[in-house]
Image (cartoon, coloured by chain):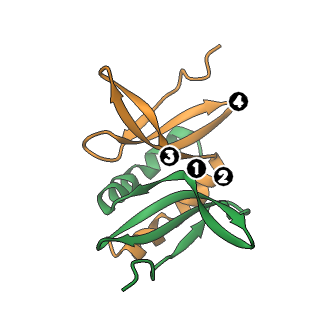
Chain colours: A orange, B green
Amino acid sequence: KSENTKELHWQLNDSGKKRVTLSDFRGTTYVHIREYYEKDGEMLPGKKGIALNPNEWMQFKRMVGEVTDALGLV
Amino acid sequence: KSENTKELHWQLNDSGKKRVTLSDFRGTTYVHIREYYEKDGEMLPGKKGIALNPNEWMQFKRMVGEVTDALGLV
């Protein structure tokens, strides 16, 4: 009974070294925003990053427009 | 000439322990998604977190809807 069968990911830059991934842990799906590194041709999760639970993700989602405005981006 | 005069932040949970902050470093504004901890009544940035440059932020912004869908949230 593996907890890691579902491992979707999105890349935040061309190098693919920063990623958003979903992973299940004890019945809850967390959104990880994390740096990866390459080892033997494989991309592995590094130490820099953070995991958000679904509530934190929804809170995050609500503030994305405001953060973008504050950055001065469109 | 301080680089830290602009320090906006948003809270991701009620405890305020996970935050999104903007901070300037060498002329570029980064979005930090980071855990904070309390010390002597002050909230200080902890080790768990990641910084996104403006390009990475915009890439991230584009995938927020897709991540939310994948989470099965509205």
Tag 2 residue? A55
Q: Give the quarter of the image for residue A19.
A: top left
* Sequence order check, earlier mark of 4 and 3: 4
Front position among marks 3 and 1: 3
Three-letter code for the amino acid on which mark 1 is drawn: Val
What is the number of the mark on residue A49?
3
C-alpha separation, residue under disc 4 versus residue under disc 2: 16 Å
Q: Which residue is situated farthest in the top direction here? A: A1
Q: Give the SS element for disc 2.
A: helix
The answer to which of B28 and A8 lies nearer the viewer is: B28
Q: Are marks 4 and 3 on the same chain?
A: yes
Q: Which residue is situated farthest in the bottom direction here? A: B1
Tag 4 residue? A26
Q: Position of residue B26 (x, y in %)?
A: 30, 71
Q: Where is residue A39 in the image (x, y as percent from the top left)?
A: 34, 25
Front position among marks 2 and 1: 2
C-alpha separation, residue under disc 4 versus residue under disc 3: 20 Å
Q: Compared with residue A4, is residue A58 higher up or lower down, i.e. above or below? A: below
Q: Do labels 3 and 1 share a chain?
A: no
What chain is tagged by disc 2? Answer: A
Three-letter code for the amino acid on which mark 3 is drawn: Gly
